[in-house]
Amino acid sequence: MIAILLLLLSSTQAATFLLVAGAERRHAQERTRGEIEEATRVFVQFLAQTIKQLSLAVRLLSSDYAFSSTFARLRNSDDPVARATLESALQNYRGRIEAASFIRLISSDGRTIADTLPAEASAKLVIDEKLVLRAEDSPRLQATKIETLGDTLHLIVIYPLLAPEPSVWIAVGFPLDAALVAEFRRLSGFEIAFLHNGKVAVCTPALEHASLAFTPDSAGALQTIDINGRPFLGLAVPFPEDLDGNTRIAMLSSLDTEMATFWQLEKILFVLNAIALLVSGIAGVLVARGVTRPLISLSDGVRRIMRGDYRARVPVKTRDELGDLASAFNRMAVGLEERDKVHDLLGKSVSPEVAAELMKSEIELGGEIRDVTILFSDLREFTTLAETQSPQALVKQLNAYFTEVTGAVESAGGVVDKYIGDAVMAIFGAPVAVADHAERAVSAALAILKAEESLNQERRRQGLSPLRTGIGISTGPVVAGNVGSASRHNYTVVGSEVNLASRLESLTKETVYQARIICSDATRLALKGGHALRDLGETEIRGKKGTLRIWAVDPQSGE
């Protein structure tokens, strides 16, 4: 009850906090949006004006008569001196254009004629025919492109060279470096980055080593970006004059800075809510302490019962509903303790599967038809062995033998139905139905002979005579269920196949067969293969009409 009250109180406080936080966050984001949008608009206008000035410088160079004359005179010359003179002229004119990093002369098909860049850098910079075609289609005969050269982003402007041959173009590169964004950062207070092909190419120091994951189709939409573990609000807009659309301008502002006032208010609200919850919790505990103690005692008792400790009891201190509940719990614990003793005793008398069947809530006499495999095992010359041993020693040796037989049966998924003197009757396929019950029975029989061999080695060391087991196996329909009276019953199987398994076990005594394991033809047909079966022919079985084909399972089989 206290938990429910605290939950309701905390839910109300959390809802109030979220409403206030949401309103303040929306207000801060709207304010920041306006500031970022205005700063972005100013910066884009600044870049557009800068590009316009750079383009004008390129046009002035293209119309320079001395430059055009020098190019016309030297462009077709194969003289290395002439080529060096042309490149020297390009370097000279590059120095005249403020902020220009290189000048390149190209043909209409994009081929480089002359370049101020070193050979290695020139090979990495591609100004192809597409840019020339774009300039030819432009009313101003001009085109721009954003490219990276080394670690620096460049704005490239091309314009036709006014030479005698109009098929020559001049390309001038201007670096978009950190100084450009740093200056605007100083003026606006916002962080700026140039994004080229989705990666940061140029940025202010706060954005270094950051991955600005702006959604590609959200140009102009304010987004929250995590940068080095800090949240930023920002938007990305296309770079002016970048007709390829590969470059964008990102303008960002720290959310921590914008939301500093809100964070302070949030801390105050959080502390007040925590104090309110603490006071409410202490008051609730003091009020409900007398009610919760009996429940805690009951809970401890239930946990002990769950761990199997059926001796758990709880004190009964009151005569109210909680006292009645404690008394009922104690009566339940007594019943469970008695039931556990019965189950433990039953589990030692029958197999776990049969015990589970007998422990069902409703036990009725009768059974159902099941297709199973029956295994009978019996010790040879047991009477002689009994005459030479004391009863205590004989029981000890039988228990050791039965332990091995039971282990082999249960490992194969069978159930030991009963012990008959020195004989063992086992069932495969009941009470738990399995499809390969014949396979399991044969595997258990082979395992019994193998365990017998190990047991005999120990008996020889003790000076005892070895044991020798005969096993009969039959497969077919039987009646499986509870047999007996209403006051005393047993789970077992009844049918002719049970008798047949016993008769087959008796045949192992006859020296004519020389077999330790004999199975019926039905068992052979139910096997999947992999066993060494030996045809023993047909024989008459007491209790069966006609003759029955039987088979020997050799211990040397491929188990």
Image: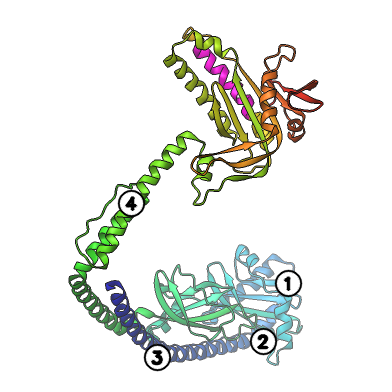
Residue named by callout 3: 31
Residue 355, numbered circle: none
Residue 77 percent across, percent down from the top left: 74, 71
Q: Nearer the viewer, residue 92 or 473?
A: 473
* Quadrant (top left, top right, bottom left, bottom right) of the C terminus: top right
Q: Secondary structure at mark 4?
A: helix
- Discs 4, 3 touching: Cβ within 8 Å: no
Point 70% across, 30% down: residue: 474
Q: Find the distance from the CA under tag 4 to the CA under tag 3.
A: 68 Å
Indicate which disc, 4 or 3, sits on the residue closer to the N terminus: 3
Residue named by callout 2: 142
Q: Nearer the viewer, residue 343 or 443?
A: 343
Indicate which disc, 1 or 4, sits on the residue closer to the N terminus: 1
Residue named by callout 1: 111
Q: Find the distance from the CA under tag 2 to the CA under tag 3.
A: 39 Å
What residue range appears in magenta?
444-459
Seen in the image, is 418 located left or right of residue 8? right
Point 43% across, 72% down: residue: 227
Q: Compared to 214, does 19 lie above or below?
A: below
Q: Is residue 28 visible?
A: yes
Of badges 1 and 3, nearer the viewer stands 3
Q: Please tell me how crowded label 4 is: few (under 14), some (14-19), or many (20+) other residues with Cα within 10 Å.
A: many
Quadrant of residue 391 in the image? top left
Residue type marked 2? Gln
Q: Please tell me how crowded label 3 is: few (under 14), some (14-19), or many (20+) other residues with Cα within 10 Å.
A: few
Seen in the image, is 55 located left or right of residue 556? left
Of badges 4 and 2, nearer the viewer stands 4
Q: Find the distance from the CA under tag 4 to the CA under tag 2.
A: 95 Å
Residue named by callout 4: 333
